Amino acid sequence: METTDKTGCKILVELLVQKGIKRVVLSPGSRNAPLIIAFVREPRIEHFIVLDERSAAFIALGMAQQSGDPVVLACTSGTALLNYAPAVAEAFYQHLPLVVISADRPEEWIDQNDSQTIRQRDVFRNYVKASYSFPAEINCNDEHWYINRMINEAVNLSQDGLPGPVHINIPLREPLYRVKNYENSELERTVNTLYAEQQIGKEMMAELANTVASYKKVMVLASFGTPDMTLNKALEAIADCCNIVVLTETVANLSSHKFIQTIDRVLSAMTQDEKKSLAPELLITFGGSLISKMVKTWLRNYRPIEHWHISPSNHIVDTMQCLTRHIAVQPYGFWRQLSGCIKDGGSNYAELWQNLKLRATYSHSKYIDTIPWCDLKAFSQLLPAIPEGTVLQLSNSTPVRYAQLFEYEQVKRVDCNRGTSGIDGATSTAVGASWVNEEKTIFITGDMGFLYDSNALWSHYVTPKLKIVVMCNDGGGIFRFIQGPSELPELEEFFETYRQVDVEGFARLHGFSCWSVFEEQALQNVLPAFFAEKESASILAVHTPREVNDRILNGYFKRK
């Protein structure tokens, strides 16, 4: 096989193939030419070329998010690598396996005023599970062994426990474009890690089950995670206990009529007395960071006697400032074990929550029926109309918060970049997600987020399966909902950054099918055609009145 003459790059790609890596996202460059040659000439790895490194990294993140498999990123030297930073941080906190590979100048040229040369070693040290650096050349068998060992460790670590990104920095000397024919080369040695499933001992689990049964008010709170039927079934069994209520956020990807799936809708319907009387005695949490500020504030004000957090990580997460026990196992294993030995605590706590849920649903529907055209009205029409089996991607700021208020169980899975909660790469993430999914991917974003990540639109990997809904309210509407900036005279210019985004112009520029709506009936009329479009990717611009949205949403949270 003819490939790059840089032996380290050849070893890297061969070993990645043997370890089951399926995809690499490359960005063009000169210093990374040996990496490009090695990857592109390897037919067993699907390669993607994305010019903008920030967009490339989020596309890779979307692929890893949906597939669960490690995805490789490879870029040239200098600031190209720094453009990966937002997606690397998101992958770190979202626990997604990215293998980040950067070409570099040899060590002796760092800080010597050579072009495209910065301090790359350990540049992501706070946001990766580990960093590695190759020797600039392979001059002996020990250096070959060392590189082989590093690659094995890096790929294994990206998937170990809580998955996450790793970084491999590869110094490369010129010339960079030479190739070599390797005949009869031996397979690289692979080192595989056997992941033993952690379990809690029977005696300890019995003690935990007895503790759960001893409390009359137990709350399970699930934040973001991937779909898991084993976990879902175990939690449904847990929810049958009269003293336990299960609250799940939209991006938890857990679904049952037994759960409280619209947390903010239900909490906003509480009376002052219910905020105190329905506060849990035992709180059990799992998953990533919570979307709902409302539930965090409530639980911090009415702290439980005990708070358990379940995560295989050794890092202590004390979101409610009252943690009493960190249970270091995978959530699905914990709930599966507990469901097998749980005892009913014998209270009416679950019933009280289900009654509150019914009351909240009634007041929600009544309020939606009375409001004029606005963001909330648009979401009330859009979300129930999403086709069965669709994958839903949500941008941060207002879209994910509106989505928390509705039920739409026909959707296959829901994702949002809640690791760091930024808007910077949401469209690129949706592009990557859409590429690896057979189903339609619906992406809902705001106009500022759409503009921020517009480089994603000219990717070669946008397919007709991708449908983008842009909420056009002329600026960062979330700042009108937040107490603080909404009261300042600087709101429009410095926080909301009021501007009209020409969504339709972007659609024409990049060859998207496009629809625009300005009122409720028009939205209902275009949704079937928008979802059914098969010839090209589609954009739906939903225009709502900027000055009305905050008043309507604030009114929603004051309803009873």
Image (cartoon, grey):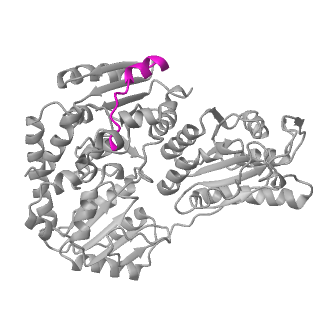
- Does 520 sit above or below residue 412? above
Residue 313 point in image, percent of width and height: 49, 68
Q: Position of residue 376 (x, y in %)?
A: 20, 38
In the image, farthest residue toward the front:
489
Q: Residue at x 92, y 58 (%)?
A: 140
Residue farthest to the right, as pictured: 139
Q: Tell me the quarter of the image containing the N terminus.
A: top right
Most foreground residue, 275 or 327:
275
Image location of residue 477, percent across then percent down: 29, 40
Q: Do we see residue 192 in this rendering?
A: no
- The correct choice, above or below, for 29 with respect to 334 in the image is above
Residue name at image x 35 percent, y 75 percent: 323
Quarter location, residue 489: top left
Residue 346 visible, this orientation: yes
From the viewer's perspective, is residue 290 above or below residue 556? below
Residue range in magenta is 495-512
- Name the image quarter holding residue 35: top right
Q: Residue 279 occupies which quadrant of the picture?
A: bottom left
Q: Residue 275 in the image: state x and y as whole percent.
A: 14, 66
Query: Is 475 colored magenta in this rendering?
Result: no
